[in-house]
């Protein structure tokens, strides 16, 4: 009788121990699952916050680029307004350029300006001297009080570009149209600086010289008709205005991050 009770008690204890062990196992699994859910919620919150920050930075960069483009448009229109009825120019707001077309500055095949081109270059220099300091760092370190900027934007560079037609050239002075176009751009720059030395002192926000020169020969035509009028249009001096943009590395990083997250 005593042995039977002892055996029953052992079976009861064994059963209770197994139940307790099973209960501990399920409790451990529940704790584990709750922990994983908590970690998942934290990761999801971090992901959402990171995406919002990335999209905010992208929106800010887009807004800054839009402002810069509008500022460049204002700059071009201000120059054209000052030169209106004094010097024939063509502005291209999409490309950010101002063109002095045809042969108003140089004879065909030459980089020596016409005598009557010098007053025209002085008019251009005067307009640049009035407008560019509003978008750059001048020697005075302060923009002129006459600046009435409607949009935020800073210039990174202004290139005086020389362009020719397709007529070949090979002389002791000019071996090709590359040489001719570069010489015309350099001559234009010298004339502008001689008339308005302050233009040479203008710098961008990285303290680099704002104005530079380049020559493209016949390789960037604005008219490909091949007509005499078209070739005259291609012989031109062009001013290209480059606006400062948001930090390129930051912008690329934001774009890559947003694209990667959207691809998941």
Image (cartoon, rainbow, N blue to C red):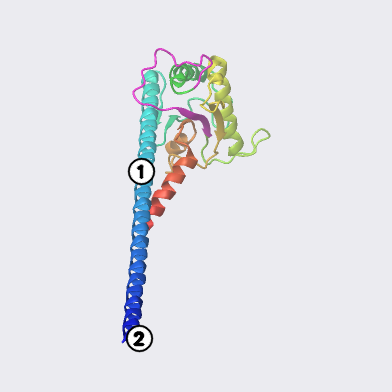
User: Is residue 226 left or right of 169 when viewed as pictured?
Assistant: left
Q: In this view, does 184 lie above or below 227?
A: above
Residue at 47% in and 37% down: 247
For residue 213, what is the image quadrant? top right
Residue sitting at the far right: 172
Residue located beneath label 2 in the image:
3
- In front: 121, or 228? 121
Give the crowd class for mark 2: few <14, some 14-19, many >=20 residues within 10 Å.
few
Left or right of 178 in this view: 55: left
Q: In the rendered picture of this protein, how many numbered marks are placed on residues? A: 2
Viewer-proximal residue among 20 and 183: 20
Whether residue 149 appears in magenta in the rendering, the answer is yes
Number of residues whose C-alpha sits closer than 10 Å to that of mark 1, classed few (under 14), some (14–19) or many (20 or more): some
Q: Give the mark, 2 or 1, whose residue is nearer the N terminus.
A: 2
Residue at (53% x, 33% y) in the render: 162
Residue placed furthest toward the front: 2
Which mark, residue 186? Answer: none
- Asked whether the beta carbons under mark 2 and mark 1 sit within 8 Å of each other, the answer is no
Does dot 2 land on a helix, a strand or a loop?
A: helix
Q: Main secondary structure of the magenta part?
A: loop
The residue that disc 1 covers is 55
Considering the image in quadrants, where does the N terminus appear?
A: bottom left
Mark 2 vs mark 1, CA separation in Å: 77 Å
> Which segment is the magenta one?
137-162
Residue 212 belongs to the span the image colors magenta: no
Please say whether residue 93 is visible from this viewpoint: no
Residue placed most toward the observer, 62 or 56: 56
> Could you say where residue 245 lies in the image, as x and y percent from the top left?
45, 35
């Amino acid at each position: 009788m005593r042995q039977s009770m002892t055996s029953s008690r052992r079976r009861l204890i064994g059963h209770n121990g197994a139940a307790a062990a099973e209960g501990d196992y399920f409790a451990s699994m529940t704790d584990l699952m709750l922990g994983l859910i908590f970690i998942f919620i934290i990761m999801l919150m971090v992901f959402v916050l990171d995406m919002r920050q990335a999209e905010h930075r992208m929106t800010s960069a887009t807004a800054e680029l839009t402002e810069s483009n509008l500022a460049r448009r204002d700059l071009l229109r201000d120059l054209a307004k000052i030169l209106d009825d004094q010097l024939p120019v063509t502005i291209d707001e999409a490309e950010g350029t101002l063109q002095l077309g045809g042969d108003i500055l140089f004879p065909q095949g030459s980089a020596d300006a016409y005598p009557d081109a010098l007053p025209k270059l002085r008019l251009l220099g005067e307009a640049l001297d009035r407008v560019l300091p509003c978008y750059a760092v001048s020697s005075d370190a302060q923009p002129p009080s006459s600046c009435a900027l409607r949009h935020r934007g800073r210039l990174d560079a202004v290139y005086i570009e020389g362009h020719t037609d397709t007529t070949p050239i090979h002389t002791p002075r000019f071996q090709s149209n590359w040489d001719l176009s570069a010489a015309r751009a350099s001559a234009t720059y010298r004339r502008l600086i001689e008339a308005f030395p302050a233009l040479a002192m203008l710098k961008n926000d990285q303290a680099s010289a704002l104005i530079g020169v380049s020559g493209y020969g016949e390789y960037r035509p604005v008219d490909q008709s091949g007509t005499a009028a078209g070739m005259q249009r291609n012989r031109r001096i062009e001013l290209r205005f480059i606006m400062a943009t948001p930090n390129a590395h930051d912008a690329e990083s934001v774009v890559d991050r947003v694209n990667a997250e959207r691809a998941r």
